[in-house]
Structure formats: C-alpha cells, structure tokens
Image: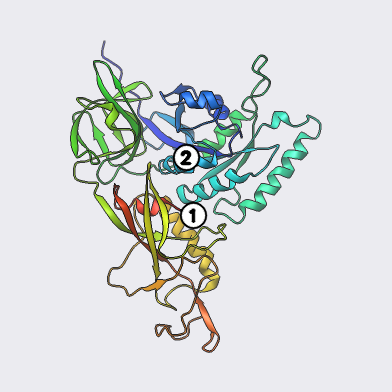
Amino acid sequence: MGTLPAPRVYNVNVGVLGHVDSGKTSLVAALSTTLSTAALDKHPQSKERGITLDLGFSSFAMALPDHLQHLPYDDLQVTLVDCPGHASLIRTIIGGAQIINMMLLVVDVTRGIQTQTAECLVVGELATKDMIVVLNKVDQLPQEGRAKIISKAKKRLSQTLNATKFAGCAMVPTAAKPGTADTPGQTLGIQELIQEIVKCVPVQPAAPSGPFKFAIDHCFAIRGQGTVLTGTVLSGSAKVGDSLELPELKINKKVKSMQMFKRPVQSCKQGDRVGICVTQLDATWVERGIACTPGSVPTFSGAVAAVDKIRFFVGQMPSRMKVHVTIGHQTVMGLIQFFGLPDGAGVPQSHALHAVMARMDLLTSQDEAQHFDTQQEYVYQDEVYGLEGRPYNPLEQHQLPGDPNRAASDRGGVHHGPQWGLLTLTQPITASEVAIPTSGVDVMHV
C-alpha cells in the first residue's frame, strides 16, 4: 500500500500581544492543539518568574473553511506567536511582530488598557493590517451585570481604537483559564475567537517571491541528527537538499530535513513555521538570526530608513541623537540624522494623517520598501516631526506656488511629507535591504 500524500497546509501566523498578566499564555494554551519546543513559557526563567520572557510558538489546525475552498490546500493551520508583555522585553516583541499576519490584542477586562497594551497597539500598527481584541478574564466579573460591564469595556476600547488603523475591529470576550488550579472551570469564548480568526485569514496568501529568507528564533542540537534551526520563512521557498547561508557566520549549510510542528515535510515557503535540520553546525554559534539563499542578505553599518514619529510619543527626537535600532531579533546602537522633502513638496495638512496611515500600510506589506529617490533634493531637519508638521524655513527658497500649507507668505507655513533618517551604526548588522522600515527605533536617554 502506498504512502498517503502529506496534507497541503495553508499557514497563518497570529501574534498574541498584550500587557503582562493579561492572560496571553493561558489564551494560547486554550487555543493550541500542537506545541513546539518553545511554547507556553518553557524557558526555565519564565517558570521561575511566572511571566513570558521569550517568544513561544504553538498551533491549531482545521479543515480548510468554505471561504478558502478555492485555494490549493487541504487544511488551515494557525500558528500562535506568544509575545512577552513586560516593558523591558519590547525588543523581543518587535522580533515577534515581524513574522505575523494578524494580531490578537489581549486585554484584561477587569483593568482595561494598560501601559504595555498601548505599546503593543503601536507595534501592531507597524506590523499588521488585521487585529482582534480579546477581552480576557470575563469570568472574574460578577455574573449579574457581566454583559453590561463587557459592553462598556467595548465602547471605551472602540473610542481608543478610532484613532488607529484598527477602528471597528472585532472584540471577543473570553475566559481562557477560569476557576482555580485545583478546580478549573469551563473556558468561555474560545470557539467564537477561532471563528473571528478564520474570518481574518487572507483569501489569497502571498505568493512566495524573492530569495529565501528565514528568521531564526531558536536553535538546538539533536544527537545523531544535526542542528535544528526553528523559525519563520519571511520570503521565498526552500526544499530539502538546498544550500542555505548563515550570513552572520559567513558559512553555507545544506538542508538535511524539515519539520512543521513535528510533521516531516520536503519544502517550505513564505509564511511557514518550520524547523530546518543541518549538519556540522555547532548550535552554540546560533541563537537568533537569519538563514537565506547564499548571497541574498548583506551586512552593513549604515542605512537610509523611512521614519515616522509615533503619534502617541510627545517628546522630541532631535537629529544626531543616539538610538537603539532593532531589526528582527538584532539590536545595535546608532546615530540618526533626519531629512525630508523641501518645503511645499509634501501633502496638504488635511491629508497628513491619511498619508501616515498609508506609509504604515506599506510597512506591513513586508515585501517592499518606501521608494527613495537618490536624485531628489532633500533638506536637513533638526528633528523628526509628527502630525504637527515641520515649520517652513523662512530662508528656504523651495516653496511651491499656490502651496495650500502656506496661509500667507509673511506668516510662514507647515510642511507635511515623508521623512527619512540617515543611520550610522556602531557595529555592522546583517539584514535584508527592506528590513529597516519594518524595524523599531527607540530613544536611548543619555
């Protein structure tokens, strides 16, 4: 009897983000049917401290839903990326955000939006186009009046989200871990949440394109087999027998075997969560990083990055400031200088917010960078500007006739338009050319 062919699986990656102690890991446990080697806080320090310290991966699967029957797949697999919620681990969250297709924002319904809730919302705006709010711990609300409390919580959250790209997103009340350790209760809202996740699955997955790029988040050795690199395929595809480069180590390795959640496979493609086994590689050499088609990922110490000031950040970000630059799982120090288009070459003030949202959508596409014209003339900026715009330079001679942002020539005006930063890094970093715009830049206070 012949071996049955492996099912064709459509994988989507769902980030689970939220404030510490909002119940993210409990929610992931309630949803998951298959766990990876890095799931549900298996890190020893996570168990000791009782909080998530690293990215965790698990999944659940189902037959392909009706609205996806036109696709050449048999099953839908949802990979859950459990991100830490503690403020000190924001860079780990950024590392997880680069690989997700959609996001679950977990909110403790008894507390509402907290500090890291807002920070995760900002990261989500840069990382994905689709989000579901999970109002967790509804079992801790009094039975009498519970529906009314949940309704008020939804209304408050809707008002907050109206100022973001996620206005009108679905909100699902859940109880992921009701009861106590001795007498656990019945979970609430999990099936409803799964239905909402399925609704957000893209009806047309991104076609694998470009060279193979694989974000490595864990690495371990298996005696007698080799070294396993686990991670998510960012672009392209690969198969058993292909040669991969570890550009930070400047070495090439051949793919010996692959697994997706303990299921052997012969190939992987963009969006897949996979473990890749190679031989003759010391697992201690690799913690996190990237594997790729040989020669496709450069190492550099300077770059031009498209930048936008986060709308909720009230401080100044002057040129020549020291910053941390996070690209994937790598963080290095750098110096940044800002510049933009000449006065009058931007957009009307009434279109400024829409333009910022459009640039964010470009970031979440994850496959193309914002266009940068090396022949264009630019002007140096003392700082990066937000929706308030950049005041016109009274000595600048590049204002355009009829510019709607200039009320009168003697009263000056305000420029709104794309901005860039010239980054000078303190040490070389290895990353894709389009990785900079999807990275995080945060202020180092000195």
Q: Position of residue 410 (x, y in %)?
A: 53, 89
Residue drawn at 19 percent across, 41 percent down: 294
Label 2 belongs to which residue? 201
Residue kind at label 2, given as amino acid type:
Val
Q: Is residue 258 something that shows in the picture?
A: yes
- Residue 84 is labelled as none
Q: Quadrant of residue 175?
A: top right
Label 1 belongs to which residue? 445
Q: Relative to the observer, which residue lies in front, 424 or 20? A: 424
Badge 2: few (under 14), some or many (20 or more) residues near its Cα, within 10 Å?
many
Q: Position of residue 79 (x, y in %)?
A: 44, 32
Residue drawn at 71 percent across, 28 percent down: 139
Q: Position of residue 83 (x, y in %)?
A: 49, 36
Q: Is residue 406 something that shows in the picture?
A: no
Q: Is residue 108 left or right of residue 5?
A: right
Residue kind at label 1, given as amino acid type:
His
Colour scheme:
rainbow
Q: Which sits earlier in the primary sequence, circle 1 or circle 2? A: 2
Q: Relative to the observer, which residue lies in front, 199 or 252? A: 252
The furthest residue to the bottom: 410
